[in-house]
Image (cartoon, coloured by chain):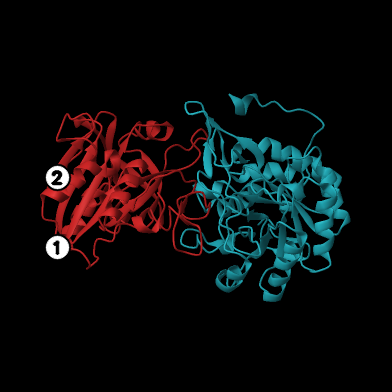
Amino acid sequence: MTHTDFHLGGVHCKNRVFVASGTFGYGDECMDLVDVARLGGIMTKSLSLKPRDGNPPPRVVETPGGMLNSIGLANIGVHRFIAEKLPILRSIDTTIVANIAASSVDEYCAVLDLLEEAGGVHAYEINVSCPNVKEGGLNFGTDCSMTAGITRRLRTRTTKPLIIKLTPNVAQISTFARAVQDEGADAVSVINTLIGMAIDVRTRKPLLSTVTGGLSGPAIKPVALAKVYETARAVRIPVIGIGGIMCATDAIEFFLAGATAVQVGTANFIDPATGVKVADGIATWCDEHGIDDVAKLVGALDARIGVSVLESWL
Amino acid sequence: MLHLHSRVLSLRPVAPNVLVLSLHCPELSVTVAAGQFVNILVHDGIETLLRRPFSVYRTEGDSIEILFQRLGKGTALLAKAKEGQVLDLLGPLGHGFHLDEPSYETAVLIGGGLGVAPLPMATEGLHRANKNIVTLLGARTAELIIDGHLQNVSVATDDGTRGFHGTVVDLAAQVWDARDMPSPRIFACGPTPMLRALAAWALSRNIACEVSLEGQMACGIGICQGCPVEIVGQERKYALMCTDGPVFNSRDIII
């Protein structure tokens, strides 16, 4: 049997597959369809201090191999999350990672403090990189000193793992990863969505109410892999790979590129059990290939020589 | 909510570019309610990545039927489904019409175009609830009127090729003036502009009106937050079409 478990900043996780923030609700919506306890962990929908209505429709549009979204961080707010969702999540035997979004450094701190006080959350993922809200969000994530500053402030308020979710919409993502590592972050999530756009030529209108939105899905996997590869070579802390993972071999590509763990996102919209299937598939793949610990795949890319892809391409 | 793999029993045309897909689906055929929908994976490739939502048209024994029009990429693929092929679907999803409400006697079913889809199931439910039924159908032209499995049907066409020459909302106004409608409640489905006009008219006449909306969604089960519907008189600004709807009281929303 392959060892699939690992430690993320001191927290034991049963496997290396998480569900990405914003693609699995608050964790309790899909319990009919998915045995959520078989996930490595759940990144909750981004939580802000007050409830957020989100953006007007249309908020989603399909694009080749992917989708654009402009949800605008619609969420019930941290108080309702603590009252209504946390009691359910506490009963699930998996790692609960609260994702926090905010429009000021003080708001990040306030949300984290409330969650610390409530208990039941194992780690925090900080969304400094939502592309769909005007104030805060991406403005923080594209400013390296701001991103580092948020990490510094939050680091003093919790001993739990602090994961910073980075945006690819910057010149060099590894600079940001190094900056948050230096401020004490335990891990980075790479990548959030890429800014994208789609247009209806007949009406000449954008297909999202906010004109641009965040691109996700298989279309972004090659970009995500390259960003994970770049980041993993630049930092000592774990890199959690995200971007277009649909199946176990997609996840294994991320491990080879340097990811310690992965998140399944858009695929949950098509099949909410994708995360569990990917986790099972990784274990099976490792068994079949004589790998006794998934850790042995992390960063195990053989970049020295090219390989022929003729067979799989034909 | 179930994740199902259902075999295609048949796919038959009922009007130009309009087809009825029959699926072997005993898991849903008994439990699905009028106005609920299923979210079908139309292709497992990446060109059409997301599922497509469809109202359930009819149920019969172990099968469910989907009425759809070939419009875009998703329905073009669904129109190629072969007998015996297995389709991946999630359902039953959303909340249907409130047919059992004791507050009314006459159900007025109004369908615009393919909005007729949930009405045969509603008709069955209304029979069980012992309600009077009046059905009004509108379409661009006569050949797009799909009036099977309905009761007491009047028709409006935009081009006047069948029935009333005009919109189904204009037809509703005419019918209301001409007939006795004891304690009515409207159940409607159709294109958004039609529902908008109907809701405004129903409000002006103080008639209870439920509308079934359609729109883009990524998941259909409430996790993507991608299908907001603006609501009135509540703390939150938006409901979700997929889990709070697709049927809404027309007074509760801004169409």
Q: Nearer the viewer, residue A16 or B68?
A: B68
Q: Which chain is red?
A: B
**Residue B249 visible in this rendered orientation of the protein:** no
What's the mark number on residue B153? 2
Chain under label 1?
A: B
| Quadrant housing residue B116 | top left
Image side of residue B33 versus residue B94, left or right: left
Q: Position of residue A300 (x, y in %)?
A: 78, 43
Which label's residue is closer to the chain start, 1 or 2? 1
Categorize mark 1 by other alpha carbons within 10 Å: few (<14), some (14-19), many (20+): few
Q: How many numbered marks are there?
A: 2
Viewer-side label of 1, 2: 2
Is the N terminus of chain B in the top left, top right, bottom left or bottom right quadrant?
Answer: bottom left
Image side of residue B14 versus residue A183, left or right: left
Q: Where A223 falls versus B196 (above or below)? A: above
Chain under label 2?
A: B
- Whole-number angstrom distance, CA of label 1 to CA of label 2: 18 Å
Q: Colour of chain A?
A: cyan
**Amino acid found under the numbered disc labelled 2:** Val
Q: Position of residue B7 (x, y in %)?
A: 33, 43
Q: Where B88 falls versus A110 (above or below)? A: above
The residue indicated by pointer 1 is B130
Residue in view at x 57 percent, y 63 percent: A76
Q: Nearer the viewer, residue A302 or A134?
A: A134
Q: Position of residue B191 (x, y in %)?
A: 34, 41
Q: Where B202 falls versus A26 (above or below)? A: above
Image side of residue B32 versus residue B217, left or right: left
Image side of residue B66 versus residue B106, left or right: right
